[in-house]
Amino acid sequence: MTATPLLPELTARAEAIAHARTPTCSCGVSGTLADRPDGTVVRHADTVAKAHAPDADTGELARRLTLAAGLPDVFLPPLGPAPVDLHGRLVTFWPYGSPVDPDDPDAAPWEAVGTLLALLHRTPVPESAPAMRGPLKAARAVAGLHAVGDHPAVAPVLDAWATLPAWARAEAPMPQPAALCHGDLHLGQLVRVPGASWRLIDVDDLGAGTPAWDLGRPAAWFACGLLAPQEWGRFLDAYRAAGGPVLDAAQDPWAVLDVPARALTVQTAARTVTKAVADGRPLDEVDHALVDACRRIAAVPAELAHESTK
């Protein structure tokens, strides 16, 4: 949990900015939206404040805020041009947006996801753009398994990780050409604001990198049986229709999505195993599906596993 006094002071900052934006604020809706080691998010009315990870870099985060502010049709724009320091944590402020309803998966806006990613990937990459951090986050998730011990799910995840090319493990530069990428795309990264359509949130991993990475998590869910073929098709069709550069209309998507899908399957499995052990609970059905997928990844001969990186 977040150490005091960060959380109460973050809440107070959100309230102050909300009142500056709307002097007639009813103060009826407020609270903590997330409180994790890598980020604390609080809401007051129509304003959200986020304390970023302790190791967040001021310059890189400022450049990411500039990128998001310059893409108002893709990202929810920040309420300020630069992060502020609060008890040694970088803090940013945002308008509140309604998230995807986790209890209504059939209403998930897959067309919006595909369209927003296509628009992002088609945006020229500024020289000032930092590197997309997706592979680095995957590597950190896998590194966290070393604290788990001899749990039987650890070996399959590590074996699958070993089949990936160096760039997907953050051990080498990402393949070119680079595009602007979100870096951590999932349905929790979409919100809708009144009078507007869906927008992306969370700029922590935004930057220049391999755009197929952003399609990798939906691809991983589909490969693991966690995303229905209809939703997968809607996502791909929308991405292609909006001119997304990763996929050609006649191209087999797995020719370019195989490595990111495998990497994000491993990342997600590493996180779920680590969390299950920390919570002292057995793996659930989704956890087992991810670990089983890692076993299948590890069973592919190395020469075939690396073929799609050429």
Image: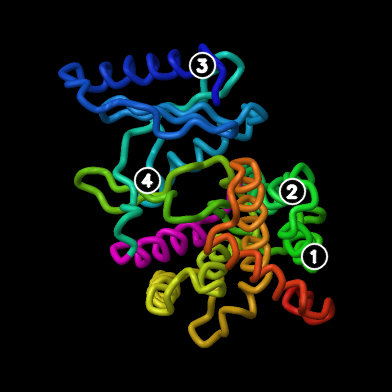
Q: Based on the displayed image, in which of its 4 quarters is residue 259 positioned?
A: bottom right
Which labelled disc corresponds to residue 159?
1
Q: Amino acid at mark 1?
A: Asp
Whether residues under marks 3 and 1 lie with C-beta atoms below 8 angstroms apart, the answer is: no
- Distance between the alpha carbons at the discs numbered 3 and 1: 39 Å
What residue would you read off at disc 2? 145
- Distance between the alpha carbons at the discs numbered 2 and 1: 12 Å
Q: Earlier in the sequence, mark 2 or mark 1?
A: 2
- Distance between the alpha carbons at the discs numbered 2 and 3: 28 Å
Left or right: 243 as drawn, with respect to 263: left
- The x, y position of residue 128, in whole percent, is 63, 41
What residue would you read off at disc 4? 72
Secondary element at image label 4: loop
Secondary element at image label 1: helix
Left or right: 133 as drawn, with respect to 115: right
Q: Amino acid at mark 4?
A: Pro
Which residue lies at the image location 50% right of the left edge and 62% below the top edge? 122
